[in-house]
Image: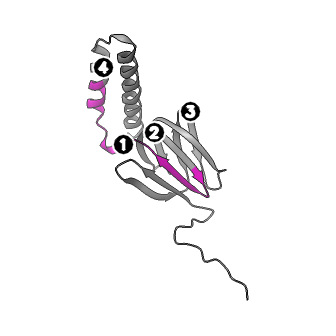
Amino acid sequence: KSIMAEPSPNTTTNADLRVVVVTPEQTVLDVTTDFVALPLFDGELGVAPGHAPMIGRLGFGELRIGHAPGTQRLYIDGGFVQVVDNVVSVLTNRAIPATRLDETKIKESIASLLAQPAAGDDELARRAKTLTQTRAQLRVVQHAK
């Protein structure tokens, strides 16, 4: 008598990719799709079913889930991604749906940051990081149009 393992309810088929986005506060998203694009710190990564296992460091930018016209877009604020067995796990400080980003407020923030004087290396570094994050949010909201 052979013993066969029963597939668990969380097991995905070869045609599915499970995407889980987690922040320190909550699980923001847990969906199944056929494609995901992630903002790595040094470029963009596209993941389809059957992708090799990997771990990567995320940058500030756009997480795209699926293909047009039903693409979901989120702003991701750094963190890490792990791809294993058709599961893409995204651990990030912030994940904001593109629909919740306000282009006018983002542009005002950029203008305000650029107008503020910065004294010293620490203030310059903080301002540069905030500008990078804010500009990434602007790109996400503009791509979502």
Q: Position of residue 63 (x, y in %)?
A: 47, 43
Q: Is 101 a magenta residue?
A: yes
Splitting the image into 4 quarters, where does residue 29 fall?
Answer: bottom left
Q: How is the image coloured?
A: one colour
Q: Position of residue 13 (x, y in %)?
A: 60, 66
Please, which residue is most extreme toward the bottom here? 1
Residue 112 in sight in this render? yes
What mark, if any, has residue 62 been given in the picture? 2
Chain-order first, disc 2 or disc 1:
2
Q: Position of residue 49 (x, y in %)?
A: 61, 55
Q: Are dots 2 and 1 in contact, CB under 8 Å?
A: yes
Residue 110 as seen in the image, left or right of residue 61: left
Residue 70 in sight in this render? no
Does residue 142 lie above or below 31 as drawn?
above
| Front-lying residue, 57 or 32 | 57
Mark 1 lies on residue: 98
Q: Report, in whole angstroms, how far the alpha carbon at label 3 lies from the one at label 1.
A: 20 Å
Mark 4 lies on residue: 113
Chain-order first, disc 4 or disc 2:
2
Q: Report, in whole angstroms, how far the alpha carbon at label 2 lies from the one at label 1.
A: 9 Å
Q: Report, in whole angstroms, how far the alpha carbon at label 4 lies from the one at label 1.
A: 22 Å
- Label 4 sits on a secondary structure element that is helix
Residue 91 as seen in the image, left or right of residue 12: left
Q: Residue type at mark 4: give it.
A: Leu
Chain-order first, disc 3 or disc 4:
3
Mark 3 lies on residue: 43
Chain-order first, disc 4 or disc 1:
1
Instruction: Please name which of the two marks, 4 or 1, marks the residue nearer to the observer.
Output: 4
| Front-lying residue, 53 or 74 | 53
Q: Residue at x 52, y 67 (%)?
A: 10
Q: Report, in whole angstroms, how far the alpha carbon at label 4 lies from the one at label 2.
A: 21 Å
Q: Are dots 3 and 4 in contact, CB under 8 Å?
A: no
